[in-house]
Amino acid sequence: MLRIAFFRSLNKSSRFALIPKYNPRYFSSAKDIKDTEPIDFNIDYELPPTKRTYSPTETLETKRARLIYQSRKRGILETDLLLSTFAAKHLGNFTSEEMDEFAALMDENDWSIYYWATNAKVPPEHWKGSKVLELLIEHAKNSEKKILRMPELGESL
């Protein structure tokens, strides 16, 4: 008898493994048990971005504070560190339109943002030419070779 194990990883690949379940009733001899290596299939798929709605009456300072908080609490440490240091460095100088673009970028999948920023994957067409994404890619290069740490709330770099 085979059981199917499904592992969902955060990097958009799903892993399926067919694992024989040892039960003497299903195997006639030890030679039937030899083939217990899992069979691995990788399936790549893109998760659609989350469409969040924000208050149209949100002030610029409220929007900036929300984006700073959201950049820190992503769920994946690598993306948290990248986006929080980026927000602390650049968000204070962003216009309202650039903050809207940053908010739209934050609606994307965490691993997608990380892969685009580190040039591990090519961004989709709708992000080509984005000033905010270009700044994030430049920030991710860490050309100053500084050791990055999560900035304190209210701290700017």
Image: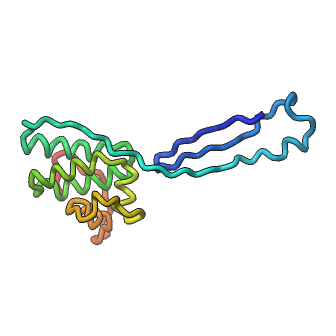
Q: Is residue 100 left or right of residue 137?
A: left
Position of residue 89 in the picture relative to residue 24 (left or right): left
Query: Measured along the vertical axis of the image, is residue 6 above or below residue 126?
Result: above
Residue 33 is situated, as x and y percent measured from the top left of the image, at: 84, 41
**Among the 4 quarters of the image, the one containing residue 94:** bottom left
Which quadrant of the figure contains the N terminus?
top right
Q: Name the side, left or right, on which 104 lies relative to 9.
A: left
**131 and 138: which is toward the camera:** 131
Please give the name of the residue rendered at 26% of the width and 51% of the height, measured from the top-left corner: 105
Q: Residue furthest bottom?
A: 143
Residue at left 23%, top 42%?
69
Colour treatment of the image:
rainbow
Nearest the eye: 20 or 140: 20
Which residue is pictured at 58% across the width and 46% down the height?
15
Percent from the top left, x then y, of residue 25? 87, 28
Check the image and name the residue furthest to the front.
Answer: 125
Count of labels in the image: 0
Residue at the image position 46 percent from the left and 46 percent from the top: 10
Q: Position of residue 132 (x, y in %)?
A: 21, 59
Image quadrant holding the C terminus, namely: bottom left
